[in-house]
Amino acid sequence: MTARGMAGAPPQGELAIKVYYEDTDCLGLVYHASYLRFFERGRTELIGAALERPIADWNAAGYLFAVYKLEVTFRRAARLGDICRVLTRFEPPRSEYRLCVDQRLLRGDELVCAAQVQLVCLDASYGVRAFPAELLALQPRATAPR
């Protein structure tokens, strides 16, 4: 995983994914649920790299990140043996209680699948809590419409 961002810009992550037999259906195409695993890996790695602290440490500190809403668009099929990239970036925040993430799975420069994900943060009792300030500070600022 690489987490990169220009000075002052929010980090973006890129994670290499190789499609294995376990990721495919009987036709050798990536099974739809496998894309969700690929995107989960991308989010986990970006959050850990951007905050310079593994996500498991945040969980141990009582910050549990859960998917609230997920919208996926399938454009092409990835296949057994493909080498793909998961691109992950934060979107402007809706509130301190919701983190929005844009994710794309590419094969070369070809868009295979895209997802818009909204995360919430839970405490150890599974009640909603604000995201850590360190994570909120990494999100891009919303711009006013022109």
Image: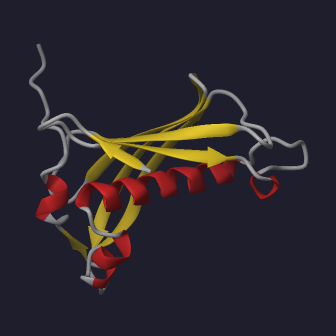
> 60 above or below 18?
below
**Of residues 74 and 21, the one drawn nearer to the viewer in this rendering:** 21
Q: Is residue 85 left or right of residue 124?
A: right
Q: In the figure, residue 96 lies in which quadrant? A: bottom left
> 122 above or below 141?
below
**Of residues 28 and 50, the one drawn nearer to the viewer in this rendering:** 50
x and y, in percent, of residue 45 in the image: 41, 57
> 22 above or below 3?
below
x and y, in percent, of residue 111 in the image: 57, 26
x and y, in percent, of residue 15 in the image: 50, 46
x and y, in percent, of residue 78 in the image: 72, 36
Residue for point 56% across, 45% down: 16
Q: In the figure, residue 125 lies in which quadrant? A: bottom left
Quadrant that contains the C terminus: top left
Q: Is residue 20 left or right of residue 40?
A: right
**Of residues 10 and 36, the one drawn nearer to the viewer in this rendering:** 10
**Of residues 2 and 29, the one drawn nearer to the viewer in this rendering:** 2
